[in-house]
Image: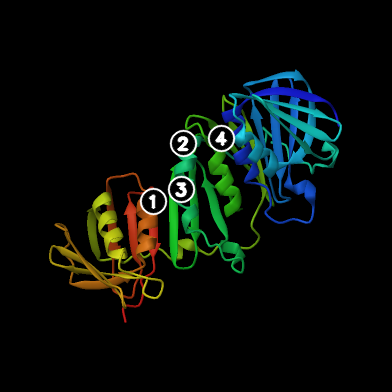
Amino acid sequence: MLSMKVICDQSALAETLGIIGSVIASRTPNPVLTCIRLTAEDGRLTLAATDGDCGLRMVMEQVQVDEPGETLVPADKLNQIVRECPDATVTLENDKQALFIRSGESMFKIYGFDPAEAPPIGEFDQNAVDCEITAGALVVLINRSLFAAADEHSRYAINGVLVERTGTLLRMVATDGRRLAVATGSTSSGEGEARCIIPSKALSIMRRILRNDAALVRISMEENKVHVHVDDPAGQATLTSSLVDGKFPPFEDVIPKDQDKRVTFNRQTLWTAVRQAALLTNEESRSVRLHFQDSQLTLTSHAPEMGEAEVHLGIEDYSGEELEIGFNPNYISDALKVIDQDQVVLELKASNKPGVLRTGKEFTYVLMPVNLS
């Protein structure tokens, strides 16, 4: 191994290691895939890790490089040590097969591997950018879609989020078969069309590297990979991920076009009522009944051997016929949690038809009802 000595801010290093560590596979027969590669050169420290499908490289600018070099060490143990370091600064210094971590009066030594054994992580091609968007705008799109993605490995094509760009319009779509979330935003550049399905894990990591809302994010979509580069003044980050195989369902066919009942809610008021009604549900009866009549909404729930709840809401603009429909309250709360507008619109058709929650053109959420019987 090459020798290395670099002095870092403890909190900044701990934060970066926490993000990089989220890439590491929880179980792998290859110990190198549990490691982080550290490279100190040109006054910066670069940290990189991969699980074989998803790779992340992050640069720390606010460091003091006394001696350039590199090392490859177990991510989890390094992360644990740095989090427990007592001083404001941490010194990383390696010698042959070991990395020394010093902070205050504490010193740790961990054994690593030859950095040449680290799997390569794809470089970002600045000439192959499909779109540019600010980090803050991208975080909103991820927040409004990722929560609805399937986590069932048997349904691989929907175990991810569809990213679809048409001109400067960017959409993220996710479904688990019981609900569908469509988040729409705009990019600062983009021509033609591009689309791919990004794995949920990669999007979760992507969200964590978008720490500065004003940072510029460049996205490049290839046939089987996506590359994301974040221009953050505190340090650049590049994420590379394999894409989800398969074809995403034709989601636009799922969005109802004939809803004839429409009601506007204050987001916080509706969310509070749903959370209250959800208190008297359990795994066997995970449903809340919504009864619309005249200018009144009544939410009721019942859990055998536990009790029942009844919550009333005034709704001034409901003009449709009386309707009773059941929904999983967690699914309603999941959507209301990621909306930052004050007003939300709920569109309905019948007790056995999907409901649609909207906030203008930016967010559409289709929710399958539950059987009231």
Label 4 vs label 1: CA separation? 21 Å
x then y, percent, for residue 114: 85, 38
Q: Within 10 angstroms of label 3, few (less than 14), some, or many (20 or more) residues?
A: some
Q: Is residue 129 visible?
A: no
Q: Within 10 angstroms of label 1, few (less than 14), some, or many (20 or more) residues?
A: many
Label 3 vs label 1: CA separation? 11 Å
Q: Quadrant of residue 80?
A: top right
Residue linked to disc 3 = 143
Q: Is residue 83 above or below residue 294?
A: above
Which amino acid does the dot numbered 3 rest on? Asn
x then y, percent, for residue 124: 69, 36
Q: Secondary structure at mark 1?
A: strand
Residue 123 left/right relative to 22: right
User: Which quarter of the rendered picture does the C terminus lie within?
Assistant: bottom left
First in sequence: mark 1 vs mark 2: 2
Residue 262 left/right relative to 81: left
| Residue found 49% across the figure and 51% down from its top | 172
**Circles 2, 4 touching at the beta carbon (< 8 Å):** no
Which amino acid does the dot numbered 4 rest on? Val
Q: Secondary structure at mark 4?
A: strand
First in sequence: mark 4 vs mark 1: 4
Residue linked to disc 2 = 136
Which amino acid does the dot numbered 2 rest on? Gly
First in sequence: mark 2 vs mark 4: 2
Residue linked to disc 1 = 363
x then y, percent, for residue 14: 60, 34
Which circle, 3 or 1, is nearer the viewer?
A: 3
Residue linked to disc 4 = 217
**Circles 4, 3 touching at the beta carbon (< 8 Å):** no
x then y, percent, for residue 329: 34, 64
